[in-house]
């Protein structure tokens, strides 16, 4: 008997790709027709093949083989595969048997999901005495299944306060490839689980948790085994900071931004000290340490969504800085920066992309930028704004941007940046911004513009605060506004959970005086547990427990 191997590729309806391997056996002295009931069937050595991959970026699983045997009357053997589960099949003939190898598709090629395929092995006999025609005999079909798990990529915020329930965003790939029936933080079930249409993120509300690290697990009704995960939510105990003051590392006149690093119990202050520096104040063993000063020429900085880096800007460059060591990385020049313009402010969404605004040395509008960490690309965002000042919500879900300058004679729109869509859109509100940046609560249900106008999440005006407000922050649930009032000389608290029908809010209780005057060029921040206010000006930084009102 003489044997040889040929290969053909077919594309069948309803299949992603179908490949056929044909094995021919030509028998000397073949006589008579074949294909009758006495033809020995093709037999295969297994009932099914199953592949699995831990995620869409995982390595291709190892190929698997099975053996097909056929009777003496079979003179030709065809092997045809179909379905998304299979990339290719190969065959090695040995006498009256063939070893057939099934190669699964690359996870990167098909993405997450449950895929099926089949390998059909058919024996052919001679249909006449001269074997000039073939007759199909029996076919053995082997089912192939392939599970590529969804991937969990990140959670934001990545660190939360112990003892508080809140909603986080979990980002991933293929979250709709399987039926997600629940989310667990460690062994603790979440509530209010919602997966977006694209299957790239879900929101879930965790209950109050004790300090620790909680691996995030997805439950599914149609995923075999546990969905792999190495994404964890960190939970830390809040700190009751005592009232005190902190000095700038060198002479300053204005604070450009102020933020609190919950993981490291650190205050991050960007000011004009030292020509534009980032000062890092760590709290340890019950006391604030001396600040570490970084760089020169910095205009703003924001913590990355995963807490590993500070993303900072100078007039024409983006700079990554290690959040733990404060080592400065390699800068990226802003491409196509308009003449006489410079980078102004930076905020970071829950997807770790940075929204960067720009400004001109003269009045006018210029495009801002988006920095995308996975690609390392800093590119224009397509929206021109005038000297825009953004404030990102604590959830990272969106930012409010006020714009304008003193030379304008008419109001300009306030913009909303939606992280999920990576898009800027004009709101229904127009104004000319003053020195007080926007304030927004965690879920963007309350917004304060120009330090005086309080809006709901749909930009309906609810009420007003005094014109003497120099800085304001909101409680995370949006129920309270904490304002530094220059006339009162301290902190005033307002109940902004109620709609005042555009009238003025009345302060709750008496003014809370600060330990010292923070000075001009003021910025404010509040800790995620709402327990401490930071009021920083050109003279000093004031740490103030939040008034219990």
Image (tube, rainbow, N blue to C red):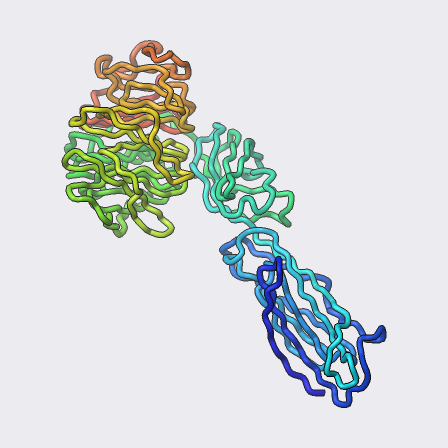
The image quadrant where one finds the N terminus is bottom right
Report the side of 169 relative to 335 (left or right).
right
Front residue (pair 524, 290): 524
Quadrant of the rendered image containing residue 13: bottom right
Q: Is 23 situated left or right of 470 in this image? A: right
- Residue furthest toward the right? 38
Residue 26 on image: x %, y %: 71, 85
- Percent across and percent down for residue 346 are 29, 38
Camera-nearest residue between 30 and 515: 30
Return the residue nearer the eye: 19 or 200. 19
What's the residue at 14%, 33% (across, down)? 251
Task: State whether residue 244 appears in this view.
Answer: no
Which residue is found at the position 22% from the left and 41% from the top?
A: 343
Residue at image position (57%, 47%) is 177
Q: Is residue 503 left or right of residue 188?
A: left
| Looking at the image, residue 448 lies above or below residue 260 | above
Give the left or right position of residue 258, taking residue 272 as reference.
Answer: right
**Total tally of numbered discs in the picture:** 0
User: Which quadrant holds the C terminus?
Assistant: top left
């Amino acid at each position: 008997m003489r044997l040889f191997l040929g290969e053909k590729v077919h594309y069948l309806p309803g299949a992603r790709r179908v490949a056929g391997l044909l094995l021919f056996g030509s028998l000397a002295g073949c006589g008579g027709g074949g294909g009758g009931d006495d033809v020995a069937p093709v037999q295969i050595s297994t009932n099914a093949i199953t592949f699995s991959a831990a995620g869409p970026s995982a390595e291709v699983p190892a190929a698997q083989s099975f053996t097909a045997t056929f009777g003496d009357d079979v003179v030709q053997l065809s092997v045809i595969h179909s379905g998304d589960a299979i990339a290719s099949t190969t065959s090695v003939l040995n006498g009256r048997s063939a070893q057939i190898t099934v190669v699964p598709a690359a996870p990167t090629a098909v993405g997450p999901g449950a895929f099926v395929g089949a390998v059909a092995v058919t024996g052919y006999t001679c249909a006449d005495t001269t074997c000039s025609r073939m007759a199909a005999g029996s076919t053995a079909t082997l089912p192939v299944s392939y599970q590529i798990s969804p991937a969990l990529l990140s959670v934001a915020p990545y660190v939360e306060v112990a003892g508080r329930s809140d909603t986080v965003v979990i980002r991933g790939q293929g979250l709709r490839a399987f039926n997600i029936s629940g989310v667990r933080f460690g062994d603790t079930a979440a509530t209010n689980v919602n997966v977006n249409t694209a299957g790239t993120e879900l929101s879930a509300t965790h209950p109050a948790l004790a300090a620790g690290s909680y691996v995030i697990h997805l439950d599914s009704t149609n995923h075999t085994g546990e969905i792999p995960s190495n994404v964890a939510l960190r939970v830390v105990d809040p700190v009751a900071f005592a009232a005190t003051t902190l000095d700038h590392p060198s002479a300053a006149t204005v604070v450009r931004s102020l933020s609190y690093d919950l993981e490291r119990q650190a205050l991050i202050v960007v000011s004009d000290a030292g020509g534009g520096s980032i000062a890092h104040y760590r709290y340890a063993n019950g006391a604030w340490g001396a600040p570490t000063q970084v760089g020169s020429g910095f205009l703003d900085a924001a913590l990355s969504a995963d807490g590993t880096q500070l993303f900072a800007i100078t007039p024409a460059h983006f700079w990554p800085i290690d959040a733990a060591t404060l080592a400065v990385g390699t800068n990226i020049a802003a491409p196509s920066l308009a003449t006489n313009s410079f980078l102004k402010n930076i905020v970071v969404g829950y997807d770790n992309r940075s929204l960067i605004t720009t400004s001109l040395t003269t009045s006018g509008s210029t495009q801002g930028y988006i920095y995308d960490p996975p690609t390392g690309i800093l590119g224009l965002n397509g929206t021109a704004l005038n000297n825009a000042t953004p404030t990102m919500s604590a959830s990272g879900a969106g930012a409010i941007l006020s714009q304008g300058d003193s030379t304008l004679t008419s109001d300009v729109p306030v913009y909303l940046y939606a992280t999920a869509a990576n898009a800027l859109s004009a709101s229904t509100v127009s104004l000319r911004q003053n020195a007080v940046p926007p304030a927004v609560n965690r879920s963007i249900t309350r917004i304060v513009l120009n330090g005086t106008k309080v809006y709901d999440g749909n930009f309906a005006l609810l009420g007003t605060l005094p014109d003497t407000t120099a800085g304001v922050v909101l409680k995370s649930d949006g129920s309270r506004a904490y304002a530094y009032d220059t006339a009162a000389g301290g902190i005033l608290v307002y109940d902004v959970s109620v709609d005042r029908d555009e009238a003025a809010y009345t302060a709750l209780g008496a003014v809370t005086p600060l330990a010292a005057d923070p000075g001009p060029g003021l910025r404010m921040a509040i800790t995620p547990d709402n327990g401490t206010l930071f009021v920083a000006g050109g003279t000093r930084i004031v740490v103030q427990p939040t008034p219990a009102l």
